[in-house]
Amino acid sequence: MLFAVINIMAQEHLSFKGIPIEGSMTAFCQKLKAKGFTQMGRDNNVTMFTGDFTGRQATVGVGATDDGKSVHSVVVIFDESSEWNTLVNTYDYYKGLYIRKYGEPSACREHNPSRQDSNISLMYELGQGTVLST
């Protein structure tokens, strides 16, 4: 599973699909529905949607504050892949997209044992948490 996280806490307000990640949880979810996302359900303070993100079907989780009233985060989850190259290419695509949009990260630590190998053993290592990308 590959996911992207857009999280705001005491930083400049970000947006998701042109919707500022701030304010009322209800209003944010209504705006997301207006963009074509379909609500799947709610668990604790996370409301789940499905829809198009950068041309790909994705599951989107919208996180609320402890009282459930204000939106504070958006998480995008893509389908699983059993191909290492697919994961690497997807990671590189979104990393580049966010660098172009927000600039270079202040810190980045990556360890990738093989950028060219589609070996199942690398997928196993990833599943076991021995391949690190932070």
Image (cartoon, helix red, strand yellow):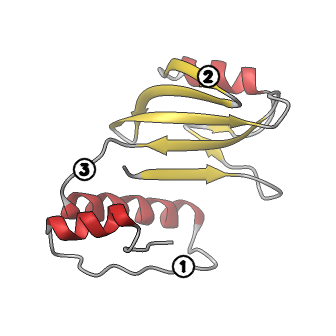
Write down the quadrant of residue 72 in the picture: top right
Residue type indicated by callout 1: Cys
Q: Give how far apart the Cα atoms at labels 3 and 1 are.
A: 24 Å
Tell me the residue at 38%/74% (across/down). 130
* x and y percentages locating residue 114 in the rendered image: 23, 79
Residue type indicated by callout 2: Arg
Q: Is residue 84 left or right of residue 131?
A: left
Residue type indicated by callout 3: Ser
* x and y percentages locating residue 84 in the rendered image: 21, 63
Other-residue count near label 3 (Cα within 10 Å), few / some / many at <14 / 14–19 / ≥20: few
Q: Which residue is denoted by mark 1 in the rendering?
A: 108
Other-residue count near label 2 (Cα within 10 Å), few / some / many at <14 / 14–19 / ≥20: few
Look at the picture and state if 113 lies above or below 127: below
Q: Which residue is denoted by mark 2 in the rendering?
A: 42
Look at the picture and state if 50 lies above or below 7: above
Please state which of residues 2 and 124 is positioned toward the viewer in this rendering: 124
Look at the picture and state if 3 lies above or below 131: above
Secondary element at image label 3: loop
Taking the view exactly as shown, the residue that stands out farthest to the front is 128
Which of pointers 3 and 1 lies earlier in the amino acid sequence?
3
Circle number at residue 81: 3
Res 92 seen here? no
Write down the quadrant of residue 115 in the picture: bottom left
* x and y percentages locating residue 60 in the rendered image: 51, 35
